[in-house]
Image: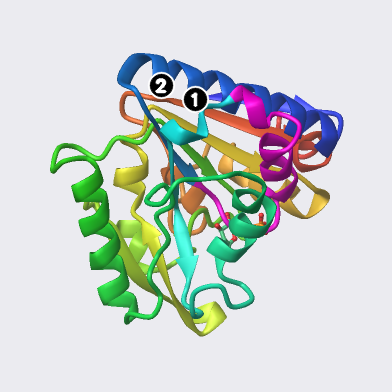
């Protein structure tokens, strides 16, 4: 696990964009395509914009496939749908071919949407192991990641799968990749900045393992690498 600390969001996004470009180009050179899982929330908007404008020509988008680590159970493209944020800040700047974006179908019930997404992943990976090239993750100020929230069933889910989960504190369901599935990826990167993430980040990097309270601690790729891209503010309470 590597903790990369930057002075500010601008530097963080710039360096993370270079990292994504490198992983994308290596993946395309090695296997002919780049399977890229996006995070939702607000943190990645600047990165998505940078990749799809300034660095648009640095990645072969015809060989790139986009997925989502989690989705909120609002209807597709309604406010708060993670896919809407990605569409507006990323995809709308590119000329993507059909079939390159795997949205979660929230017209279905949460359970059905999770099963449907897992089927689509199995199909894309031709029924072999689902190993993404790069999974980008955010972290909430409660240390949740994807939609693996503290004290939810997803904390103890040991399947390599996609699951629906009831999140009591938000009074809603979510759909999320499970931690074991995330941990199959070749590269996992957290993007985390701002003072409001400082306490959670210190806990996640603390010596005590407490997955129920700090689900981001569950992320530990089996054969891949884990990087954190954070700013000084978020890292301010981490013991160095
Ligand atoms: O609800 C969510 O929150 C996390 C963190 O979001 P951020 O706004 O603090 O960046 C995000 O990673 C996840 O995809 C999203 O559904």
| Residue 71: x %, y % from top left | 47, 65
Name the disc covering residue 28, or none.
2
Q: Is 37 situated above or below 161?
A: above
Q: Is residue 233 left or right of residue 137?
A: right
Name the disc covering residue 24, or none.
1
Q: Is 72 situated above or below 225?
A: below
Q: Quadrant of the C terminus?
A: top right
Which residue ends up furthest to the left in the rendered image? 127
Along the line of sight, which residue is nearer the eye, 32 or 14? 32
Q: Residue 219 occupies which quadrant of the picture? A: top left
Instruction: Look at the numbered disc 2 and give the secondary structure of its residue.
Output: helix
| Residue 40: x %, y % from top left | 58, 57
Q: Crowding at label 2, few (<14), some or many (≥20) Cα neighbours within 10 Å?
A: some
Along the line of sight, which residue is nearer the eye, 78 or 80? 78
Identify which residue is drawn at 41% across, 45% down.
218
Magenta-highlighted residues: 38-58
Identify which residue is drawn at 45% across, 59% down.
70
Identify which residue is drawn at 27% across, 75% down.
111
Residue 209 seen in the figure: yes
Asked if the residue at tag 1 contacts the one at tag 2, i.e. Cβ–Cβ closer than 8 Å, the answer is: yes
| Residue at disc 2, CB closer than 8 Å to ligand 1 | no
Q: Is residue 78 left or right of residue 233?
A: left
Identify which residue is drawn at 51% across, 79% down.
74
């Amino acid at each position: 696990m590597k903790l990369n600390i930057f002075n500010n969001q601008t530097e963080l996004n710039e360096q993370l964009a270079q990292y994504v470009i490198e992983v994308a180009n290596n993946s395309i050179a090695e296997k002919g395509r780049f399977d890229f899982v996006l995070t939702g929330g607000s943190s990645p908007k600047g990165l998505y914009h940078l990749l799809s404008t300034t660095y648009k020509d640095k990645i072969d988008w015809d060989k790139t496939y986009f997925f989502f680590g989690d989705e909120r159970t609002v209807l597709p493209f309604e406010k708060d749908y993670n896919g809407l944020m990605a569409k507006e800040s990323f995809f709308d700047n590119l000329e993507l071919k059909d079939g390159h974006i795997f949205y979660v179908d929230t017209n279905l019930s949460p359970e059905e949407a999770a099963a449907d997404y897992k089927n689509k992943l199995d199909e894309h990976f031709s029924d072999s192991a689902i190993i993404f090239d790069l999974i980008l993750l955010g972290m909430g100020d409660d240390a949740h990641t994807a939609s693996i929230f503290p004290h939810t069933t997803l904390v103890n889910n040991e399947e390599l799968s996609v699951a629906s989960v009831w999140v009591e504190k938000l009074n809603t369901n979510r759909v999320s990749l499970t931690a074991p599935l995330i941990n199959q990826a070749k590269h996992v990167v957290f993007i985390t900045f701002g003072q409001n993430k400082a306490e959670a980040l210190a806990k996640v990097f603390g010596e005590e393992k407490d997955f129920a309270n700090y689900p981001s601690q569950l992320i530990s790729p089996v054969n891949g690498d884990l990087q954190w891209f954070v700013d000084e503010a978020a890292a301010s309470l981490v013991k160095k």
